[in-house]
Image (spheres, grey):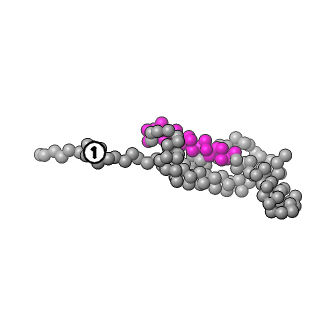
């Protein structure tokens, strides 16, 4: 059975490292892992929406890691921090440490991933060459 971080603290570990070694198996960490799974699905859903509406072309790898890798990293960090904030507020646990709903957690993670990706990771528009610009200039008409 997993324990909450408060229960881990109460166990009285001898050193800080023993306590930190137990934290990844805590209930809060598992909730955060589920939220991050939802965040990644939300980021992919944002890519699919942009691709389906014609705002971007190309594959998922190009969108996430070739066009704007810094924006992708920033969106992922933002989603992770929002998720960590929600987990730290105990929104998904009862007072006894029971988890309300794993689906609720994954859906909330989806929302976090979609929102941060849509705010931060916007695809770049294609840059035109000088020839393309000249070909698309409006022609002046003489009266």
Q: Residue at x 26, y 43 (%)?
A: 135
* 63, above or below 77, in the image: above
Q: Quadrant of residue 136?
A: top left
Q: Main secondary structure of the magenta part?
A: helix
* 42, above or below 74, in the image: above
Relative to 102, 78 lies left or right: left
Q: Is residue 6 visible?
A: no
Q: Residue at x 34, y 46 (%)?
A: 128
Magenta stretch, residue numbers: 34-55
Front residue of 17 and 44: 17
Rendered location of residue 41, percent (x, y): 61, 41
| Residue 53 shown in magenta | yes
Rendered location of residue 70, percent (x, y): 52, 53
Rendered location of residue 50, percent (x, y): 48, 41
The residue carrying mark 1 is 131
Q: Residue at x 56, y 41 (%)?
A: 44
Q: Quadrant of residue 34?
A: top right
């Amino acid at each position: 059975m997993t324990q909450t971080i408060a229960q881990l603290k109460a166990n009285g570990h001898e050193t800080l490292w023993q306590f930190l070694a137990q934290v990844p198996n805590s209930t809060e960490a598992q909730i955060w892992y589920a939220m991050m799974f939802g965040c990644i699905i939300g980021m992919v859903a944002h890519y699919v929406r942009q691709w389906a509406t014609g705002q971007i072309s190309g594959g998922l790898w190009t969108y996430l890691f070739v066009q704007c890798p810094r924006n992708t990293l920033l969106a992922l960090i933002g989603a992770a921090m929002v998720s960590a904030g929600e987990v730290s507020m105990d929104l998904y646990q009862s007072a006894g440490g029971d988890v309300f709903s794993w689906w609720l957690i994954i859906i909330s993670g989806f929302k976090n991933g979609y929102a941060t990706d849509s705010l931060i990771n916007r695809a770049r528009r294609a840059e035109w060459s000088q020839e393309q610009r000249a070909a698309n200039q409006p022609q002046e008409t003489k009266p």
